[in-house]
Amino acid sequence: RFSGSLLSPSHRNPQTMQIFSLTGHEHIALCDLLTLTGLADSGGQAKTWIAEGRIRRNGATETRKTAKILAGEIIELDNGSAIKVQE
């Protein structure tokens, strides 16, 4: 089970950058990241957003639900919310 931490929460507040720490893990699945940060209400919602092309990974649309997100990457939702992933 993943136990990363959200360092600057901004639940569902558009135009904000959250920082998410992997806390010793090498990566996190994209759908899990969206859920753990509170941007998506559920894993199902996260997967739907990804399938609809609403998520960008480092500026490019990401459509793989379980894409391995690494430290240093930036994930953006089409509403202006963003997550920076760090170690």
Image: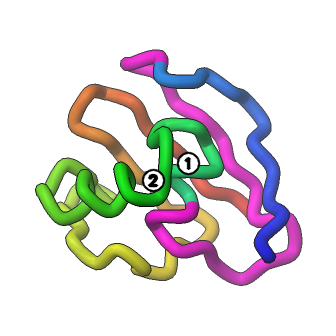
Give the residue number, with chain letter if any, for mark 1: 84
The Cα–Cα distance between marks 1 and 2, rounded to whole angstroms, is 5 Å
Q: Residue at x 77, y 71 (%)?
A: 2
- The answer to whether residue 16 is left or right of residue 33 is left
Residue 53, quarter of the rendered image: bottom left
In this picture, is 5 found above or below 26?
above
In this picture, is 84 found above or below 50?
above
Give the residue number, with chain letter if any, for mark 2: 74
Where residue 70 sits: x, y (%)? 57, 74
Say few, some or many: other residues with alpha carbon within 10 Å of mark 1 (under 14 / 14 to 19 / 20 or more): some
Q: Residue at x 44, y 38 (%)?
A: 82
N-terminal label among 1 and 2: 2
Where residue 15 sits: x, y (%)? 38, 19
In the image, which residues are magenta? 13-32
Q: Residue at x 68, y 49 (%)?
A: 20
Closer to us: 72 or 77: 77
Tag 2: amino acid: Ile
Say few, some or many: other residues with alpha carbon within 10 Å of mark 2 (under 14 / 14 to 19 / 20 or more): many
Circles 1 and 2 in contact, beta carbons < 8 Å: yes
Whether residue 9 appears in magenta in the rendering, the answer is no
Where residue 29 sits: x, y (%)? 53, 74
- The answer to whether residue 58 is left or right of residue 30 is left
- Label 1: element kind: strand
Residue reaching furthest left?
52
Closer to us: 23 or 31: 31
- The answer to whether residue 24 is left or right of residue 37 is right
Quadrant containing the N terminus in the rendered view: bottom right
Tag 1: amino acid: Lys
Residue 87, quarter of the rendered image: bottom right
